[in-house]
Image (spheres, rainbow, N blue to C red):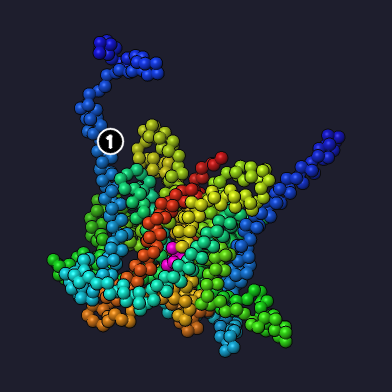
Amino acid sequence: MNNAQTAPQSPKVTKETKNKIRVEFDRTDRWTRFKIKYFSVYFLQTVVWSIFRFLLLLGISYVILQPFFAKIASSFMSPEDFVDVTVKLIPRYPTLDTYKAIITDNKYIEALVNTLTLSLACAVIQTFICCLIGYGFAKFKFKGNKILFGLVVFTMIVPHETLQLSLFMKFRYFDIFGIFNLLGGGVFERFRVIGFTSINFNNTYWPLIILSLTGLAFKNGLYVFMMRQFFRGVPDELEESAYIDGSGIIKTFITIILPLSIPMMITIFLFTFSWQWTDNFYTTVFFTTSGPKLMPDVVAIPKSLDTQYAGQNMYEAAIRNTCGLMILAPLIVVYLFAQRYLIQGIERSGIIG
Amino acid sequence: MNSVSTVKGTAPKKIRKSASLDKRKARGGWIFVLPFIIGLLLVYLPVVYDSIKYSFHEIKILQGGGYRLEWVGLDNYQEAIFVDPSFVRTLTAGVQQLLFDIPAIVIFALFIAVLLNQKMVGRAAFRAIFFVPVILSTGLISDIDIGNTLLSYMGDTSRGIDTGEVADTTSQIVSMADIGWLFRNMAVGTELVTYVTGAVNNIFDIINRSGVQMLIFLAGLQSISPAIYESCAIDGSTAWETFWKITIPMVSPMIFVNMVYTIIDSFTASSNNVMAYIAGVYNQPGGNVLSSAMSWMYFLIVVLIIAVASAVLSAYVFYQRRD
């Protein structure tokens, strides 16, 4: 204390033990420190800003989640609740009839199983194929690399409605360069090597599988782009050292690159799975009502529910929303588990230009 | 001369060696890209070619399983432009609407990404909520949501027990009068005011369509080195200055990517009016070839807009030199 008074500026350093020193210095007293910290304009600004930010984000979150709340609430409502003006969000006569009717009448379980198979198959294939293609574009210089990548972007830009008719035709009368036609019908008519002129792929999973296998399915251009950006960030030295150790290109890819890109692949998987799950473009092009039941078929008014009354519009809207909710239910579960990978994966891809 | 010849002696060997590695790598590249090339040759290009071809033809489905094409020249295009009563109107209105929406989406996405990038309570939860629309409000669900009477009823707080009947004119979040009042004393044009009001009232739509963009911006923001911000803070720049002088230039490549992505995404979304109209035409009898013609015209317009937008934007994009 004496020392501190004589020399207030310099802290006193004493050696306490062999490995420890003790520093004594004058601290500003607690109240002053408190005043400086909390009675400043800077602190006020921070507090006001964080409150404002919190409220803003909360409000926007509400805008995002409100439809879900409304849908969930209305899915438990009975027909009487829709004509009751006093009922807003909480049903007066809660019922599970809507769910039951959708499960039994709309064959929900069947659609669920079919869609799960289809989405899983497509998502796994697309994730792997896009990873492959992205790696090819990112790490290898070959002639036509840029042109081919331009074509990938082209597949992204062409709206798929543009190709709707020709996609349908392609897979309705599936043929490779007219070979089947040639073998089946045309020149070899007498021999009949193949008993048909073309294969009808409609109402099967094949069109989507073929599109997935070739990286042409829904938004695959985007995934290839993301994968390419990700692999560009992976240092070349990693593969070079593997090459020097005598590993081939494919072996390097499988043993070194694939394990590395798992977080990114989870992101892509999440996208492919959920976008295939809720897809209603390809499913309506390639599947007719006689085909396997898929999620778009679930969206219908169940026959067992009587909707002919005053609140018909509202009730039918609620039923359709309930269908939507039931379609989403498995996705919500997936999203809850996988959402943190979404942002991580994109961070890693570091999309730049 | 002599020295040149000695160099000549060694050079071919070296070149051949490096070439073989390059060749091997090039072959590897082809192997990896092969699935896409196969798809391109067997499915995509034929499909694109067919689609263009169909737009000049009429399709007759034959009894024995098969179809016949009849050449009709530019008839489909003519019909789309001159005969069809509402195609041109839908197209111009749709393009206008999208040109209006796209900046709003990009600006909103950037704004939210900047907010979500700051340290705060519940950041993880907010992030999870903001990316919900990316996963859950697509395809089928957005189709169900179009013209959802129930949602507009439930979101409408003006109609309740206390008021009994519709008291307010609309269920808009912000009314024109409020915004007008807010901007009255600011020197901004009425166009901006209408733009902001429109954007605020479309907020649900804008949020739903800006999920991926938010992700891309967030990734971009996180790739900016904190050292730059730190040095700015030491030099005494305000948050506002830092945003314009550091954040904007550093994320400008992402702004570019997002702009192009938003254009593509909004123009090809099935929820947009033109797309819905074309899909409607497709389902009419004999409308399938007509819809092909329409969508190719639409595609050309989209490409044109993307080209103009990229030309304008690429002049302003700042690329940080990376290693």
Q: Position of residue A194 (x, y in %)?
A: 67, 81
Residue B121, compared with residue A93, is above or below; it is above
Where does the magenta region start and end? A274-280
Q: Residue furthest right?
A: B2
Q: Quadrant of residue B196?
A: bottom left
B30 vs B78, left or right, is right
Hey, which quadrant is residue A143 in on the image? Answer: bottom right
Of A217 and A79, the residue lying toward us: A79
Crowdedness of circle 1 by 10 Å Cα count: few (<14), some, many (20+)?
A: few
Q: Residue at x 20, y 76 (%)?
A: A80
Quarter of the image that includes the N terminus of chain B: top right
Whether residue A279 appears in magenta in the rendering, the answer is yes
Residue at 62% across, 46% down: A239
Mark 1 — residue?
A: A42
The residue at the far bottom in this view is B63
Location of residue A38 with respect to A190 vertically, above or below:
above
Residue at image x 70%, y 51%? B24
For the view shown, which residue lies furthest in the front direction?
A18
Judge from the rendering whether residue A28 lies leftward or rightward of residue A136; answer left or right. left
Q: Position of residue A1 (x, y in %)?
A: 25, 13
| Mark 1 residue element | helix
Whether residue A69 is in magenta: the answer is no
**Which quadrant: the C terminus of chain B?**
top right
